Image (cartoon, rainbow, N blue to C red):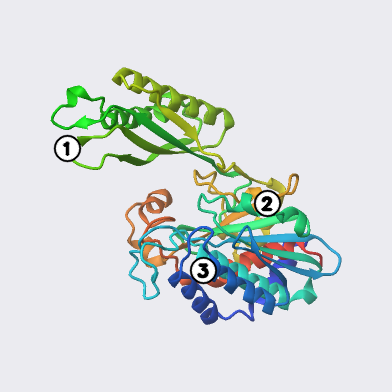
Amino acid sequence: MTEPAVAARLTRELASALEHEELEGFYQDLHRHPETAFAEHRTAAKLALRLRAAGFTVTEGVARTGVVGVLGNGDGPVVWLRGDMDALPVREETGLPYASAVDGVMHACGHDLHITWLAAAAEALAAGRGGWSGTLVVVGQPAEEAGGGAAAMVADGLHARFPRPDVLLGQHVAPGLAGFYPHTPGLTMSATDDIDVVVHGVGGHGSRPESTVDPVVTAAHIVTRLQTVVSREIAAKDSAVLTVGEFHAGTKPNIIPAEARLALNLRSQDPRVRERIVAAVRRIVEGECAAAGCPVPPEVTVRPGGYPVTVNDAVLDGEIAAVHRELFGPGSVFDFGPAMGSEDFSLLAPEGVPYDYWYVTSTPPDVWAAAPGEDLFEKFAAVPGNHSPRFAPDPSVLVPGVLTLVSAALSRLGG
């Protein structure tokens, strides 16, 4: 490992060539042209173009739209930097002059920032290759938003086709007053699972409900009863979230449909808690359907491809946090603790390879100041966050987000 002071000094030297206006232009262009999972063709092409111009050997089309750039620079460690590319099916409400030009699609999670940071960090490290040795691998990942992009890249030979990493590094933009870089050693993000439920009833005319078995009413009882799983079946010391995000039934006001469909999302941090919640979901769904007299047993399906917990290597996280403190000041780094959000980032690390994932807060100071609340957590809950149609990171984080990646990479690349 390179000493924090040395990595910070090298980073500052490389930062002198960064141009905020150019970064902002690239970022705004990506924001205007969001692309959803596995459709990131324009974004991928722009990332690939910049990597090639910087001297990387670039492979496109990994898992359909993924990009991998490799820059060898003598003997030394292999460091992977990852950024995700996909946007969300969200209609933007920020009112920004560079708001999405694609109706119903928005970079509401900040992946446009991630790719801007990744591209600029790769360019800075390539330009400053006289100060380090080793191999830098840049991964532009598609389909992080529950699209299985990381797993798809691995299935497409990511670990066999490119130099095996000694470390995997990544970061995520987050709400919170701009200028902080939260690090959490160990568990930092939760596992997630999606569960599909089909309730089978007996359809009929709305004027004769007695001749039917109404799946809408049954599904409504299921939704209500599911709210007790976390509050009454999970210990207070354990963290979990169960959300019913979809409820589909019926086509006309006067027709009682024959089925209702629910889609659930589960967040957990312990495999035993996950198993208990999944079992509770099955029990409640089956029990409510039996009580309603449904003619066919319900279907409860846990979708394949859920994301695992993200557990930072504690030693690696401590080392990179120290570099960030050296770079931005001791008060800029703190431990926010495990989040209920989920990521497929960890799937990119081959077994036994340490990884670290941290955050860059991005709420504009005026938005933060105007948010109701007296303390950090109250304000944090009040400002627009990831997946909000009003999520609008402060452009002031453009350069710092590049520096976090550059400094982290330099802390591990040979001197």
The percent position of residue 371, horizontal first and vertical second, equals 34, 58
- Quarter the C terminus occupies: bottom right
Specify the label residue 397 is tagged with. 3
| Whole-percent x, y for residue 343 in the image | 56, 49
Crowding at label 1, few (<14), some or many (≥20) Cα neighbours within 10 Å? Answer: few
As shown in the figure, which amino acid type bears the numbered disc 1?
Answer: Asn
Seen in the picture, residue 415 relative to 175 is either above or below; the reply is: below
Residue 254, numbered circle: 1
Q: Secondary structure at mark 3?
A: helix
Q: Is residue 263 visible?
A: yes
The residue depicted at 20 percent of the width and 23 percent of the height is: 211
Structural crowding at the residue carrying mark 2, measured as other residues with C-alpha within 10 Å and reported as few (<14), some (14–19) or many (≥20)? some
Disc 2 versus disc 1: nearer the observer: 1
Give above or below for 303 relative to 145: above
**Residue in the picture at 60% in, 69% down:** 402
Counting from the top left corner in percent of width and height, residue 135 is at 78, 65
Q: Is residue 107 left or right of residue 153?
A: left
